[in-house]
Image (tube, helix red, strand yellow):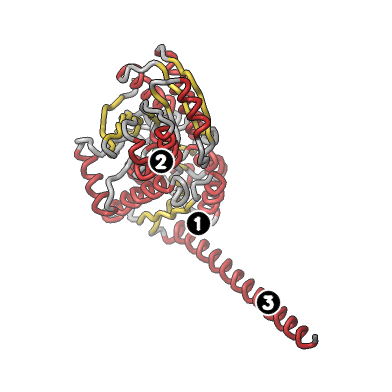
């Protein structure tokens, strides 16, 4: 008994001292990190040899390829500029935080970048729902945010500090609607949307309005939630409606799974979607089931434009893969930000905001970029077809 108690006492003591040591460690770490962030802000404001730009991206989780491609390309654009001597004699430095493909984490990450790292501007996010979670924080702190790829109209409506590099979905939805109706000559379409995703909800709506206006019919509308694994019930309902085409404006991980299950259920008609299909992982997840699919996108690496080709070559040389549209938009976002910093009166958020608002005729990989008064560029879209496991360029559609 006595012995047992001694053991228990020793154990308790060890435990208590472990906690003590651990908490000491934490305090030290906290001190260190607040010192580091103090240092970085001083560096930013005083020594003036570095400009810190933040990025919030999905480096992990179901949309990891979106974030990774974007980060790679922004870094490429900064690196190229730094080699030329940087901006106004200062080197550009990107601090990227991972949001695990989640909106809540995006809000936490942008708060940290602004309040602790003292970045002068933020790049990101790709997914509209995540940009929507971040924008009010950028706006209330008066720090400009440039979404690289979010296409839902709401993103830039959240304030005058919020800009985007991509076109918007009231353009993107109709692009595919028109293509299905006029080029594929299909009149009966089913829609399968992700109700947890602002992008998917918006794009479905914009597609539908145009398709119906043209004289087409939406004969079935089904929904899922991002992360679901079994789509058979909704796909069975779609199969019984006998559509000629299924519009599926989701992100690649869900899209790949849905396409597989659709083929298993014997649905043979083509599926199509928006830019959210663009990932090398789509073929890995969906395999042969992706064949014959169509989607709207921001650029094609097949474009002959020498500016596009030199970007494709440099990106490939550095990262070993063909840049997708996320990379193209990330690169253009880097260029837009660099140009604004060059023209800004100071590194204050309001001055960078004013310089961004004047973005005009910047040559990018995804087109020539001029922001309108709503802080959106007006650009062309391309249509891509999946053939033999590869993306084939079909056509370019200009805004009317
Ligand atoms: N447009 C998508 C959104 O707003 C994001 C995206 C852009 C995905 C480009 C792939 C390619 O959520």
Mark number for residue 15? 3
User: Number of numbered discs present?
Assistant: 3
Q: Residue furthest top?
A: 215
Q: Could you say where residue 48 lies in the image, as x and y percent from the top left?
A: 41, 58
**Which of the 4 image quarters holds residue 356?**
top left
In this rendering, which labeled residue sits more in front, label 1 or label 2? 2
Identify the image quadrant of the N terminus: bottom right
Mark number for residue 148? 2
Say which residue label 1 marks. 117
Whether ligand 1 has any atom under 8 Å from the Cβ at mark 3 is answered as no
Q: Quadrant of ligand 1?
A: top left
Q: Is residue 2 left or right of residue 313?
A: right
**CA neighbours of label 2 inside 10 A, class few (<14), some (14 to 19), many (20+):** many
Q: Residue furthest bottom?
A: 3
Q: CA distance from mark 1 to mark 2?
A: 21 Å
> Under tag 2, what secondary structure?
loop
Identify the image quadrant of the C terminus: top left
Q: Are marks 2 and 3 in contact (CB under 8 Å)?
A: no
Q: Residue at x 42, y 61 (%)?
A: 47
**CA neighbours of label 1 inside 10 A, class few (<14), some (14 to 19), many (20+):** many
Q: Could you say where residue 131 lies in the image, as x and y percent from the top left?
A: 50, 40
Whether ligand 1 has any atom under 8 Å from the Cβ at mark 2 is answered as yes
In this rendering, which labeled residue sits more in front, label 1 or label 3? 3
Q: Could you say where residue 129 lies in the image, as x and y percent from the top left?
A: 51, 38
Q: Are marks 1 and 2 in contact (CB under 8 Å)?
A: no
Q: Residue at x 46, y 57 (%)?
A: 45
Most foreground residue, 68 or 385: 385
> Under tag 3, what secondary structure?
helix
Mark yes or no: residue 150 visible.
no
Whether ligand 1 has any atom under 8 Å from the Cβ at mark 1 is answered as no
């Amino acid at each position: 008994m006595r012995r047992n108690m001694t053991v228990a006492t020793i154990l308790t003591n060890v435990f208590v001292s472990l906690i003590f040591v651990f908490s000491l460690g934490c305090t030290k770490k906290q001190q260190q990190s607040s010192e580091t962030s103090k240092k970085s802000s001083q560096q930013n404001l005083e020594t003036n040899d570095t400009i810190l730009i933040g990025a919030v991206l999905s480096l992990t989780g179901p949309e990891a390829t979106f974030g990774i491609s974007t980060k790679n390309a922004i870094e490429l654009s900064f690196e190229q500029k730094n080699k030329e001597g940087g901006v106004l004699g200062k080197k550009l430095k990107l601090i990227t935080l991972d949001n695990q493909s989640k909106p809540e984490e995006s809000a936490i990450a942008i708060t940290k970048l602004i309040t602790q790292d003292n970045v002068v501007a933020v790049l990101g996010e790709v997914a509209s729902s995540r940009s929507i979670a971040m924008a009010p924080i950028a706006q209330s702190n008066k720090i400009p945010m440039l979404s690289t790829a979010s296409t839902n109209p709401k993103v830039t409506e959240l304030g005058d500090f919020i800009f985007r590099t991509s076109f918007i979905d009231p353009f993107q939805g109709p692009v595919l609607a028109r293509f299905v109706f006029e080029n594929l000559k299909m009149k009966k379409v089913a829609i399968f949307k992700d109700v947890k995703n602002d992008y998917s909800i918006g794009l479905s709506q914009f597609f539908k309005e145009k398709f119906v206006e043209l004289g087409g019919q939406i004969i079935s509308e089904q929904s899922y939630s991002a992360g679901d694994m079994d789509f058979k019930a909704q796909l069975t309902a779609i199969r019984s409606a006998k559509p000629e085409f299924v519009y599926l404006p989701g992100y690649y991980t869900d899209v790949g799974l849905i396409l597989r299950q659709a083929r298993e259920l014997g649905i043979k008609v083509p599926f199509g979607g928006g830019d959210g299909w663009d990932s090398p992982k789509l073929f890995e997840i969906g395999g042969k089931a992706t064949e014959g699919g169509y989607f709207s996108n921001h650029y094609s690496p097949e474009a002959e434009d020498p500016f596009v080709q030199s970007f494709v070559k440099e990106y490939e040389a550095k990262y070993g893969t063909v840049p997708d549209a996320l990379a193209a938009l990330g690169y253009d976002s880097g260029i837009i930000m660099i140009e604004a910093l060059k023209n800004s009166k100071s590194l204050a958020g309001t001055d960078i905001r004013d310089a961004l608002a004047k973005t005009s005729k910047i040559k990018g990989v995804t087109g020539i970029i001029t922001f309108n008064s709503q802080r959106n560029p007006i650009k062309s879209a391309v249509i891509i077809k999946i053939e033999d496991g590869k993306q084939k360029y079909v056509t370019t559609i200009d805004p009317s």
